[in-house]
Amino acid sequence: MPGAEKISGRQAVFLLVMAVLPTSILFLPHMIYKGARQDSWLSVLLLTSFGLAAGEVIARLGRRFPGQTVIEYGRALLGPFPGFAL
């Protein structure tokens, strides 16, 4: 594909944050409070830790496979079909 450009790991993290953050600010507090009531602070703490862990995994994979797309290193890690499906 002529002119195909790739984004850096930092740009990928920025895109993920900008996609997830507004959604979580708008909808998450109400949904958490509805289910957890007074324990909603614990739910927010757990979700934040899982989100940070997922971001760390994404950043480490980006550093481990520089110059490759998610699909390319997904195939290298999981095999041809599962890597493409992921």
Image: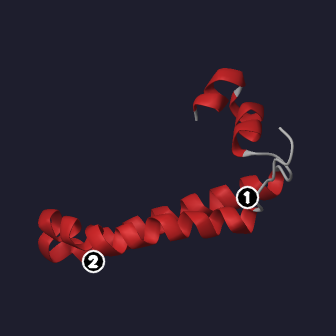
**Amino acid at circle 2:** Trp
User: What residue is disc 2 on?
Assistant: 41
- Residue 79 image offset from top left, x and y in percent: 71, 25
Q: Quadrant of residue 43?
A: bottom left
Residue at the extreme front of the image, as rendered: 2
Residue situated in front as seen by the camera: 7 or 60:
7
Check if mark 2's residue and mark 1's residue have beta carbons within 8 Å.
Answer: no
Residue situated in front as seen by the camera: 20 or 51:
20
User: What residue is disc 1 on?
Assistant: 60
Say left or right for 52 vs 47: right
Q: Tag 1's secondary structure?
A: helix
| Residue name at image x 62 percent, y 70 percent | 14
**Amino acid at circle 1:** Arg
Picture quarter with the N terminus = top right
Q: Tag 2's secondary structure?
A: helix
- Residue 84 image offset from top left, x and y in percent: 65, 30
Q: Quadrant of residue 70?
A: top right
Q: Residues within 10 Å of mark 2 (few under 14, many from 20)?
A: some
Q: Is residue 65 above or below residue 38?
A: above
Say left or right for 86 vs 32: right
| Residue name at image x 75 percent, y 45 percent | 69
Say left or right for 3 vs 29: right
- Residue 13 image offset from top left, x and y in percent: 64, 66
Say left or right for 34 vs 53: left
